[in-house]
Image (spheres, rainbow, N blue to C red):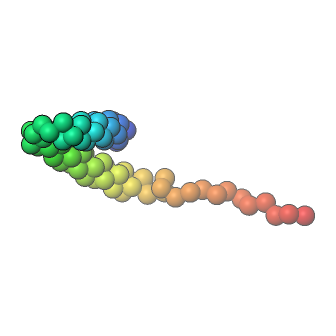
């Protein structure tokens, strides 16, 4: 997977986790068991954690390949007259 795809997948999964948490709260208010939903939430969070680790690895590799691209090129600064 490329870096942009990983970032998009992390964002998508985070939205799903947010919706899942809201669903769990609704189930709890209704007095319904939330154990299966909480297990799913834990698996989703593990997946996001793994994707974040993969993203960080890709970013590190990218910085190793292109060390000068991470620096900001400010260019020539203009002086007031």
Across and down, in percent, residue 20 comes to 24, 37
Asked where in the image residue 64 lies, by quadrant, the reply is: bottom left
Task: Please state which of residues 27 and 76 is positioned toward the viewer in this rendering.
Answer: 27
Q: Quadrant of the C terminus?
A: bottom right
Q: Quadrant of the N terminus?
A: top left
Q: Residue at x 31, y 53 (%)?
A: 56
Residue 81's place in the image compared with 65, above or below, is below
Q: Which one is in front, 45 or 56?
A: 45
State the image coordinates of residue 63 (x, y, percent, origin top left): 39, 55
Q: Position of residue 35 (x, y in %)?
A: 9, 42
Q: Residue at x 64, y 57 (%)?
A: 74
Q: Is residue 56 left or right of residue 47?
A: right
User: Can the viewer see residue 24?
Assistant: no
Residue sitting nearer the eye, 27 or 14: 27
State left or right for residue 66 relative to residue 53: right
Residue plotted at (49% across, 53% down): 69
* Residue 26, horizontal then vertical, whole percent: 24, 37
The image quadrant of residue 37 is top left
Q: Is residue 69 visible?
A: yes
Residue shown at 15%/46% (left/top)?
Answer: 42
Total of numbered circles in the picture?
0
């Amino acid at each position: 997977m490329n870096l942009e795809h990983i970032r998009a997948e992390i964002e998508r999964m985070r939205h799903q986790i947010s919706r899942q948490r809201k669903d769990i709260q609704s189930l709890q208010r209704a007095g319904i068991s939330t154990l299966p939903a909480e297990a799913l939430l834990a698996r989703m969070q593990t997946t996001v954690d793994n994707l974040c680790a993969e993203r960080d690895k890709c970013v590190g590799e990218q910085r190793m390949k292109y060390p000068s691209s991470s620096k900001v090129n400010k260019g020539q600064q203009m002086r007031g007259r």
